[in-house]
Amino acid sequence: MKSVPFLKPLPMRSPVPQGRRHTLPASEFRSLSPEDAISVFEIEREAFISVSGECPLHLDEVRHFLTLCPELSLGWFEEGRLVAFIIGSLWDQERLTTDALTLHKPHGTTVHIHVLAVHRTFRQQGKGSILMWRYLQYLRCLPYVRRAVLMCEDFLVPFYQKSGFKMLGPSNITVGPLNFTEMFYPVRGHAFMRRNSGC
């Protein structure tokens, strides 16, 4: 009987190149930072200039709020790319005034939502509604927040009503020819949900 020589297995080549692996999460939600300001402004400018001719926040104001209160912003990133965002600040009065457009009141209990915008290639996919839902869930975890307010053009009222916002009435603020409706969301009324949400 002949002995069979020991056969070594041939090394298998991986079908995937052994370069850098993809490490970015497919979808990520996080607070924004001043480093995100240019991406934020590009999305905002494209979204608002085409519709109303005005941006809610200019680039320096975006940087201002992302420096003062980044915890009141939320960005949605797909594979590292910003696709939608919300920027807010604290306010300390019942209704919005023109000061609310540029000020952050650190002792306020109302979050003024300045802007929600979605990148043009991701619109009509429900991302705005999902982002707003996540943002409101996040606000419930902040013990100092009692409510959220925003102002929007009339055609956007149904969108915000679907997210749970209620009408306060016409806003005292106008921007050029644009008139707005002021709306609010009662964050404090969800104390039970806050207690049971793991916040």
Image: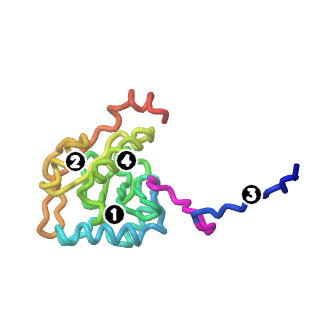
Assess whether mark 4 and mark 3 are in contact (beta carbons under 8 angstroms).
Answer: no
Residue 67 in sight here: no
| Gap in angstroms between the C-alphas marked 2 and 3 | 63 Å
Which residue lies at the image location 27% right of the left edge and 65% below the top edge?
56
> Callout 4: few (<14), some (14-19), or many (20+) C-alpha neighbours within 10 Å?
some
Q: Magenta includes 19? A: yes
* Label disc, if present, on residue 118 of the rendered structure: none
Q: What stretch is highlighted in magenta?
A: 17-29
Residue 76, located in which quarter of the rendered image?
A: bottom left
Q: Can you give x and y, in whole percent of width and height, for residue 74 in the image?
A: 41, 54
| Gap in angstroms between the C-alphas marked 1 and 4 | 21 Å
- The residue type indicated by label 1 comes to Thr
Q: Nearer the viewer, mark 3 or mark 1?
A: 3
Mark 1 or 4, nearer chain start: 1
Q: How many marks?
A: 4
- The residue type indicated by label 2 comes to Tyr
| Gap in angstroms between the C-alphas marked 3 and 1 | 69 Å
Which residue lies at the image location 22% right of the left edge and 54% below the top edge?
151
Q: Can you give x and y, in whole percent of width and height, for residue 165 in the image?
A: 23, 43
* Label disc, if present, on residue 160 of the rendered structure: 2
Q: Give SS at disc 2.
A: helix
Assess whether mark 1 and mark 2 are in contact (beta carbons under 8 angstroms).
Answer: no
Assess whether mark 4 and mark 1 are in contact (beta carbons under 8 angstroms).
Answer: no
| Gap in angstroms between the C-alphas marked 4 and 2 | 13 Å
Q: Give the residue at mark 4.
A: 135
* Label disc, if present, on residue 102 of the rendered structure: 1
